[in-house]
Image (tube, rainbow, N blue to C red):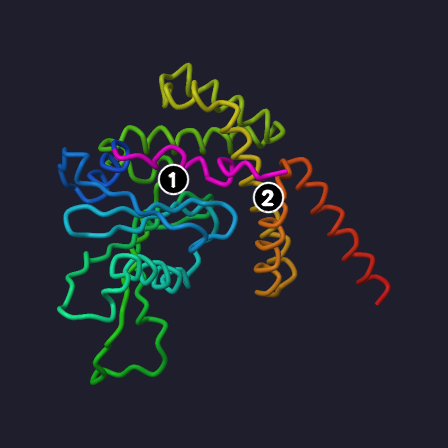
Amino acid sequence: MKANRKYKDSVFRSIFNNKPTILELYNAIKGTNYKDESMIEINTLKDVLFATIQNDLSFSIDKKVVVLLEHQSTINENMHVRFLAYILSIYLNILGERLYRNPLMKLPRPEFIVLYNGEAPFPREKIYRLSDAFEEIDDNDLILLDLTMRVINITKGVNPKLFHKSKTLKGYATFIAKIREYRKKKPLEEAVKMAVEYCLKKGILVDYFKKNAQGVTKMIKLEYSFKDELKAARGEGREEGMEKGQNYVLELVAQGLNYEEIKKKIEKTSKKKSKLQTKR
């Protein structure tokens, strides 16, 4: 059975992976006023930043290539290294065989943006630099390689000016906030349905939810399944545990398993691990 690849997208990418909403979001973040959607060329890559849940967008606009992703977990302070791999892949795609020829080909300048939408406290905005990870740099060193990652907090209530500029972003943040609110007392699937109903009643992302109500529930359930597996991996206290957890979930998705089947597989695997550890 083939995997339904639609549900590998996060709800974030499902909402924003089109030119009108990308333009609206970028204008809100940058304080620009671009109006021509034809300026945008979407060039999102597959399986570069995240293996299982795709919550990244990449697009070109005004001689820039923007790599943007939403992040709901604790901020990964090594994310700039992933961005480095991402932009290299984009540039190689642009250059192709011309990489080995003259003359010099001009490349779009890069921008790296993370939209933090987690539950842990985080400032409105923070800058991370690749050079901060370099060892033994002194004032006389010339840094020949660097990358700047801008992290913006989009959790509901933190950046009202940003929401004022992007109705779509405000609606998405409200939806996620409602899921978290309802999930305190209800199972996940019911919480998602209630959040969708709330948004429809309030006129929030109405067109999107009317077309994608069932798909949204499946995507959210898969996202939470992935998060739970990552939490379990982190609990083992091993970085390789996280990597194995991501790959395992990816394998199950590729097999075409739904959320409940994935959950059962993960539980079965966890029980086997527990038994083996007990025997030791």
Q: Which amino acid does label 1 sit on?
A: Thr
Q: In this view, does 202 lie above or below 148?
A: above
Task: Indicate left or right for 66 with 190 as reference.
Answer: left
Which residue does the image show at 24% across and 43% down from the upper left? Answer: 41
Residue 3 part of the magenta-drawn span:
yes
Residue 258: percent from left, percent from top: 63, 36
Which residue does the image show at 26% across and 50% down from the upper left? Answer: 66
Task: Indicate left or right for 34 with 56 as reference.
Answer: left
Which residue does the image show at 42% across and 44% down from the upper left? Answer: 55
Foreground residue among 107 and 186: 107
Rendered image: mark on residue 253 = 2
Circle 1 residues within 10 Å: few <14, some 14–19, many ≥20: many
Q: In this view, does 279 lie above or below 52?
A: below
- Residue farthest right in this picture: 279
Foreground residue among 43 and 154: 43
Rendered image: mark on residue 11 = none
Residue under circle 1?
155
Q: Give the range drawn in magenta.
A: 1-19
